[in-house]
Image (tube, rainbow, N blue to C red):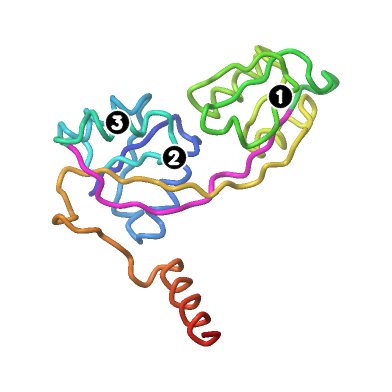
Amino acid sequence: MLIFSTLGPEGSNHHFVLQQYLGAQGIAQASRIVLFDDFHSGARVLIAGEADYVLQCAVHPAAAEITGTYRTAMVVVDAFISPSQSMALVRTMGSGEGAGRVGVQSATQTYADISAWPTVVHEPTVLAVQAGLKEGRYDAGIVFTSFATAHADRFEVADVIGTVCDAWIVYGRQPVDEGCAVVWNDSPAARQFRARIGQSSELG
């Protein structure tokens, strides 16, 4: 059984996207997911052989550091795009726009206009933002839409964000590039390229 590891806890966006990836690869039933608290822990687990692959969002704040720090012991073996869970900027019912503090995970802070809130609190995960809202540590936050739906008695949606399609990185221990670019020649983007070239040729 293959062991894939990614940032937890259960229900995180990394966990969600890893499940989508394994399903798309057709290996969900032959794989086990292990969750960790930070990517340095995940890198060490992979390098030690306790996991076979690690998934990380390419826009995660630690992506450049992780890729560089462990470049001799773990390598990028795959990359893909995937939409996130649906998201929204929510605020505590009756708090009013601009009241107090807003919680965000750093990679999501530009998904909505939060300039009206005087204090921005950075959290390591979207789930941590949700926990902070429930505990009353701030008055608004960028969270999963499912959170707003589950707590509609306490929070209202200030801005609908929806899903965000990001690039994702899969790390392993064995290089796959052989010194050349590894490209999916029949990807949706590749088909767009050929269609655009064909249109240009017809117009020319």
Q: Residues within 10 Å of mark 1 (few under 14, many from 20)?
A: few
Name the residue nearer the viewer: 41 or 146.
41
Q: Residues within 10 Å of mark 2 (few under 14, many from 20)?
A: many
Position of residue 202 measured from the top left corner of the image (x, y, whole percent):
52, 87
| Most common secondary structure along the magenta stretch | strand
Question: What residue does disc 3 label?
Answer: 66
Q: Is residue 190 above or below residue 42?
A: below
Q: Amino acid at mark 2?
A: His
Identified at 72% across, 37% down, the residue is 149
Asked if the residue at tag 1 contacts the one at tag 2, i.e. Cβ–Cβ closer than 8 Å, the answer is: no
Position of residue 38 measured from the top left corner of the image (x, y, whole percent):
36, 25
- The span from disc 1 to disc 3 (Cα, nearest Å) is 30 Å
Q: Amino acid at mark 1?
A: Ser
Please tell me which of labels 1 and 3 falls first in the chain.
3
- The span from disc 2 to disc 3 (Cα, nearest Å) is 18 Å
Which one is in front in this view, the residue at disc 1 or the one at disc 3?
A: 1
Question: What residue does disc 2 label?
Answer: 15
